[in-house]
Image (spheres, rainbow, N blue to C red):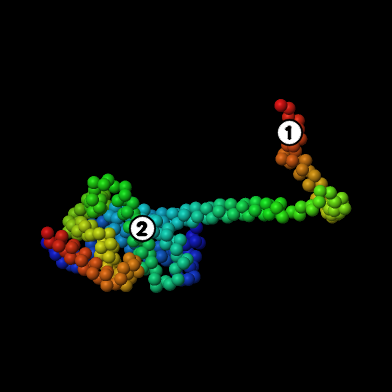
Amino acid sequence: MCNDIDKLGKQMPYTVPEGFFPSMEQSIRQAVEKDRQKRRRALMAKWSISVAAAAVAGVIAMVALKPVPTSGVVNHDVMASNNVANDSTEVYMSDELLDEWITLSENDEFINCENEIENITY
Amino acid sequence: MMNIFKRHIAKAAVTFDQVLAAYEKPLYWHIRRMVVSHDDAQDVLQETFIKIYRGLGMLNNAEALKGWVYRIATNECLRHLGRRREQALSTIADGELLLNDLMESTHVDYDKEMEVKFQQAILTLSDHQRVVFNLRYYDELPYEEISHVTGSTVESLKVTYHKAKEKVKKIMTE
């Protein structure tokens, strides 16, 4: 009975199926790629949520910071000047672009559903 | 798909391809010696290389590569063994699980009686003793490198190896 394990050598009784290591290498590469794609999707999902949250926060901030009129009297001069500003915006829109916007609004279901709601009878 | 494996990891000056080529077999055998079952060793090896791929970009020193990959493999082995113990029935002692695996495996050459007995003796050691014994005896890692793998001091590793070797010798002579 061998009692000197240093003489026993490094032989082990463990075996592997034939062709195991080349196929294992392929499996490892596939697993690494799959893991990489999974982490990439998780990262994109987190990024999307962050962007959406930032956009909502931005809208809330814009609404919250919008100047409130200091008196109950409507300042027609201000309104007029704003309308002038809007009108001046329209002046700079090309006819083609304006036509495109009008077509989009006519075909937009969300905008036009308001008309449908008015027609609903209870 | 090949590009990600050939990408040169600037800090450590090594690619994943190189690591896989150099360490697939040595890590498989290290893991196999720890978990015994070929199927389990496959799973642990795969998980090890996934973690190696994830962390390779943060490795600063190519010289630390060997100790680093063995550390990941060893930690995955210990994690696997811990999970198996949790799943096993409470009536089965820790050492018996792996001894049962050794004697019931389809990937063990039972004609090699001395080698089987040697593995049975090694499996009576604690996990930590087995890690140290296997890394020193089979992988011939210097104590300094085993220290990086286990986090133990060189002095305590020498003591652990000596005790493990004596215990195995005693069982072999019974």
User: Of helix, strand and loop, which one carries label 1?
Assistant: helix
- In the drawing, does residue A109 fall left or right of residue B130? right
Q: Which residue is mark 2?
A: B76
**Residue in the foreground of this view, choosing between A2 and B142:** B142
Subunit that carries the residue with mark 2:
B
Residues at marks 1 and 2 on the same chain: no
Q: Give the residue furthest to the top.
A: A122
Q: Give amino acid for label 2.
A: Glu
- In the drawing, does residue A61 fall left or right of residue A46? right
Q: Residue at x 29, y 47 (%)?
A: B88
Q: Residue at x 87, y 50 (%)?
A: A76
Position in image of residue A44 (x %, y %): 56, 54
**Residue in the foreground of this view, choosing between B86 and B13:** B86
Q: Residue at x 49, y 61 (%)?
A: B4
**Residue in the foreground of this view, choosing between A25 and B118:** B118
Position in image of residue A28 (x %, y %): 41, 56
Q: Give the residue furthest to the front.
A: A71
Rate crowding at label 1 as few (under 14), some (14 to 19) or many (20 or more) other CA atoms within 10 Å: few
Q: CA distance from mark 1 to mark 2?
A: 62 Å
Q: Which residue is mark 1?
A: A117
Residue B174 in sight: yes
Q: Residue at x 58, y 55 (%)?
A: A47
User: Of helix, strand and loop, which one carries label 2?
Assistant: helix
On residue A107, which mark appears?
none
- In the drawing, does residue B103 fall left or right of residue A67? left
